[in-house]
Image (cartoon, rainbow, N blue to C red):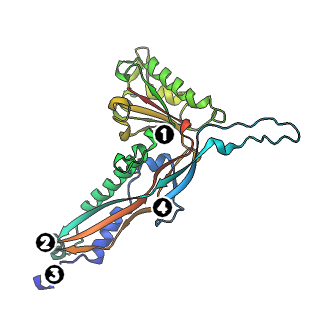
Amino acid sequence: MGNDVTATLEARDLQAIDKVIYQAPQEELVARTMFNVKTDINPGAETYGYYVMTRSGAAKIIANGADDLPLVDIDMKRYQSPIFTIAAGVRYSRQEIRQAQMMGTSIDATKAEVARRTIAEKENSFVFVGDPKVNHKGVANAEGIQVINSAKTWKTMTSDEIVEQLRTSRAKITIIPGFKSANLKLMIAPEQFEELNRRYSDYDSRSIMKVLQENGWFSSIEQVYDLKGVGTNKTDSFIIMDTKPSTCEILIPEDIVRLEVEWAYPNWKVPFEERCGGALIRTPYAIVRVDGI
């Protein structure tokens, strides 16, 4: 039987890999659950151009025949966002393949699952904080967002103080013309997200989370790992923001794809990649980041 073993990846092996790669659980794709995903760009493009609003703009009443028309384009800045390749790969040795063929099974697809998760984690990180190695910023550190420093950490705050801080931070957006009824999301670093499960007080058995949900200030409250250490002096942060496409969306010209397998003794290599432009932030002033929580 050993003479029949080819020690090459077979169709059933690639099918097992594809089943894992192309069916990522929703909890891995954190950023995609929060923002619109823009996919109508050719993956061969190196950059994507878009406009960023530097302020909310203003119209004015002009006299008949006047030529001093207020032009909103002075409130807009043209950006060219580079599009990058996020890649990872897995290796299968000849011996692993021989063993699977001997048993009449496909190869273990666990390695492909790890590769998929690695790419998803990089995508999330790229959207939220960018990557300094390629000089690209994300939602949490984009130019023009509102940044506030917290006077106290949430562990030392009372429940009332946490809720009041969230209310006043939210107001930084809702007072902007056109954002009074904005569909805002609250994104919180992991440790502070758990603080919201704290009992509100000795006299109120609700959690802080429950109080916030009943207030109806946010369409959702999300834990975002990438907000850990993202603030000033590497402190933890929360973000409140409008998540309409006109404020922010994710650019993914090409979702994760498996490329042709490659042979280099003694392993078969299976590469995966996606094309990602990160976060396209068009109205940065509709994003509030609070540090030091």
Near-viewer residue (32 or 237) = 237
Sort mark 2 into few (<14), some (14-19) or many (20+) by Cα contacts within 10 Å: few
Q: CA distance from mark 3 to mark 4?
A: 40 Å
Is 111 on the left-hand or right-hand side of 290?
A: left
Specify the quadrant of the image occupied by residue 156: top left
Q: Earlier in the sequence, mark 2 or mark 3?
A: 3
SS assignment at label 3: loop
Query: Which residue is labeled 2 in the image?
Result: 95
Q: Residue at x 34, y 70 (%)?
A: 259
- Residue 282 location, x and y as percent? 56, 45
Query: Which residue is labeled 4 in the image?
Result: 253
Is 269 on the left-hand or right-hand side of 81?
A: left
Sort mark 3 into few (<14), some (14-19) or many (20+) by Cα contacts within 10 Å: few
Query: Which residue is labeled 3 in the image?
Result: 5
Image quarter of the N terminus: bottom left
Is 107 on the left-hand or right-hand side of 285?
A: left
Q: Earlier in the sequence, mark 3 or mark 4?
A: 3
Foreground mark, 3 or 4?
4
- Residue 33 location, x and y as percent? 47, 48
SS assignment at label 1: loop
Foreground mark, 4 or 2?
4
Q: Earlier in the sequence, mark 4 or mark 2?
A: 2
- Residue 182 location, x and y as percent? 60, 37
Q: Amino acid at mark 1?
A: Glu
SS assignment at label 4: loop
- Residue 163 location, x and y as percent? 48, 22
